[in-house]
Image: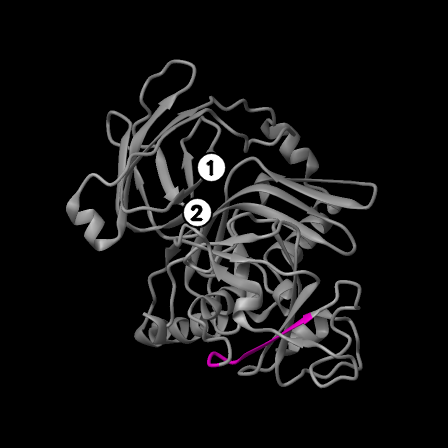
Amino acid sequence: MRSWYRVAWIAVVLLGAVGICQAQDNTVTVRGQVTALDSGNPLPGAHVMIAGSTRGTAADADGYFEMRNLPVDAYRIHVSMLGFEPVAQDTVLTEPGTYTLNFALVPAVLELDGAEVAAERDSRWQRRLERFKREFIGISENAEQTELLNPEVLEFSSSWGRFRAEASQPLQIRNYALGYEIEYHLSHFSSTRTRIRYDGDPFYREMEPESPEQQEEWKEARKDAYYGSLRHFLRAAMDDRIDDEGFVVFRIPRTRSLGLQHAGGREPRLRGRRHHFFEEADEGEHFELDFRGQLEIMYRHAPEPRAYAEWHADPRRVPADFRTSYLSLNDRPAVIDNDGDVVKPFAVTRYGFYAFTRLADSLPKEYAPPSER
């Protein structure tokens, strides 16, 4: 099946700050129109969303949309409409003001009919579905309480040791552990024995709790998912509070085996300071992660969960009292937005605990625990 997620034509006009009020509050407004590429007709009701967040809107009867009071930041803006190919535009909004982005969507071509879908639902498809859920949603305690509602939209293939998945429609996922419904527009998924790569645009909606007790459980579960995460680490680096937030960072050579030794081992490490690998970009509106070799990141305020120890498939492994992760860069420098997210999805490779966490452990971009608000 040909991937339904492809690039459509986009017209982008970046306008400077046009209002004194906007310049003062350091926010931006994004507006524009969504039309059909072939006819030029407006597409009323088209969904315009900030990927990875709960922010979004729908185009009006003339195809126009507007999102106000967005913080100055880097965003991926995702546009979708039933019957058309979705499109995503990465945009760095570095100055307060109004930005105009016009999108022209390509009509979708349906290539997979119902008979073909039904024929594929055999035992091999089921085995591949279970593998996809383990590698995409995860195997953590949160993943055990996360449900993929429409697995029938998935198609799998495998060749030369590489496993691939494509989705003909957005994946609908319900995370009962954290209290979110997730609509995930999958654009890429592939895995081998040693590496998993996936990309797409998730959109989060908070679920309605059934009781005040459940609301409190979600609140605590979200805090647990956030503290020690890569986003928590990058936000701590932005504020120059790495030590205060419970992180210890070392720079190690790329050739060294990952995860075999911890701080205090016999091999020397270079203790990482923020300015050695993380700094504000020249434009002043985002940050850059830049280093050679690898970063070893230890989070001291939480132990390894038992599921993580089992993930290593080593029966002798005992959960440690801290969590250890590793990062290497595929692009130098890697751009980090103000929410603590890596702008280019494949710019950073994660190992250790950060590789163990998957979609079931993720939170919306705007989430912050009470201590950071």
Residue, disc 1: 88
Residue 141: percent from the left, percent from the top? 57, 71
**Magenta segment:** 244-251
Residue 248 colored magenta?
A: yes
| Image quadrant in which you'd find residue 31 | top left
Q: Secondary structure at mark 2?
A: loop
| Occupied quadrant, residue 167 | top right
| Left or right of residue 21, residue 364 in this image | right
Q: Residues within 10 Å of mark 2 (few under 14, many from 20)?
A: many
**Mark 1 and mark 2 residues within 8 Å of each other at the beta carbon:** yes
Q: Is residue 49 left or right of residue 257?
A: left
Report whether residue 236 is seen.
Answer: yes
Residue type marked 2: Ala
Most common secondary structure along the magenta stretch? strand
Q: Quadrant of the N terminus?
A: top right
The amino acid at mark 1 is Ala
Which residue in the rendered view is the most extreme toward the right?
A: 160
- Whether residue 198 is in magenta: the answer is no
Q: Position of residue 109 (x, y in %)?
A: 54, 22
Residue at 48% from the left image edge and 28% from the top image edge: 85
Please tell me whether residue 45 is drawn above or below residue 73 in the rendered image: above
Residue closest to the eye, 326 or 179? 326
On screen, residue 252 above or below 148: below
Q: Residue at x 53, y 73 (%)?
A: 228
Tell which circle, 1 or 2, labels the residue nearer the N-terminal end: 2
* The disc label shown at residue 243, or none: none
**Label disc, if present, on residue 51 of the rendered structure:** 2
Q: Residues within 10 Å of mark 1 (few under 14, many from 20)?
A: many
